[in-house]
Image: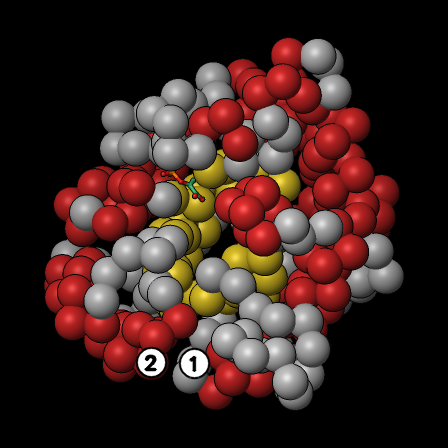
Amino acid sequence: MLIAGNWKMNKTRPEAVALAEEIVSGYGPVAGVDVAICPPAPCLDAVGAVVGNSGIKVGAQNVHAAEAGAYTGEVSAGMLRSVGCRYVIVGHSERRQYFGESDADVNAKARRTIEYGMVPIVCVGEHLEQRESGKAEDVVRAQVLGALDGITVGDPTGLVIAYEPVWAIGTGVTASPGQAQEMHAFIRQLLIGSLGDVGSGIDILYGGSMKPNNASELLSQGDVNGGLIGGASLDAASFAAIIAAAVDLA
Ligand code: PEP
């Protein structure tokens, strides 16, 4: 089980430090529940210093697929590794939507992340009209298989998938536990088909308006192995309550 907070483009460095301090002060590691926070890039090292050896891991929200070079404004996997990142979110729907990231881009970023010893959190999920027209599984299949093309994972902890229906992100509308489980089970089969036995142990997170009041029900679904939390991860008490829901189920 993994609970990961995606802070998106929120928090200056001092604000990020303050939020990380609040999260760390209320946190105690529990076997079976990993916790990560993903602040904006300029705050990664400062947040890393705050989490120290608390057990909370730090992740980035994006990475460039190239090793290094003339990509003004971009950040490489080596740079992220050098500031202590353990995870990298790749293919978030906001990056697909606003920055035109394709499945091939997501694949290249995931490969580079793995090459640098970090764990990609690969985000997939359909838009509302795709769900309403019965295409949700087709969309998610293409995203998962596109992201994993040519990737092999020796250990299930080396890869995380986040199913985030776009219509549930930041909207306050959550997939029902049944809808989440159904898609997670579908993704599970894709992972097993693509990666073999290791696919049965890969964490598949649910993301999309997960809050303290719905976390328990969502996390108790068999193939829901954690959450990628946006809005609620910006509030230490809410984030702690979601972690507590995961701990209760661990
Ligand atoms: C996200 O952006 O990954 C997310 C799940 O956001 P929210 O929890 O705010 O819906």
Q: Is residue 182 visible?
A: yes
| Residue 250, percent from left and from top | 40, 43
Q: Residue at x 72, y 59 (%)?
A: 105
Q: Residue at x 24, y 61 (%)?
A: 11
The residue that mark 2 highlights is 45
Q: How is the image coloured?
A: secondary structure
The residue that mark 1 highlights is 84
Under tag 1, what secondary structure?
Answer: loop
Q: Amino acid at mark 2?
A: Asp
Q: Amino acid at mark 1?
A: Gly
Ligand 1 image-quadrant field: top left
| Residue 243, percent from left and from top | 30, 46
Q: Are marks 1 and 2 in contact (CB under 8 Å)?
A: yes
Please identify the quarter of the rendering in which residue 222 is found. top right
Q: Nearer the viewer, residue 70 or 102?
A: 70
Q: Residue at x 80, y 45 (%)?
A: 145
* In the image, residue 216 above or below residue 10: above
| Residue 8, percent from left and from top | 38, 54
Q: Is residue 121 visible?
A: no
Under tag 2, what secondary structure?
Answer: helix
Query: Label 1 vs label 2: CA separation?
Result: 7 Å
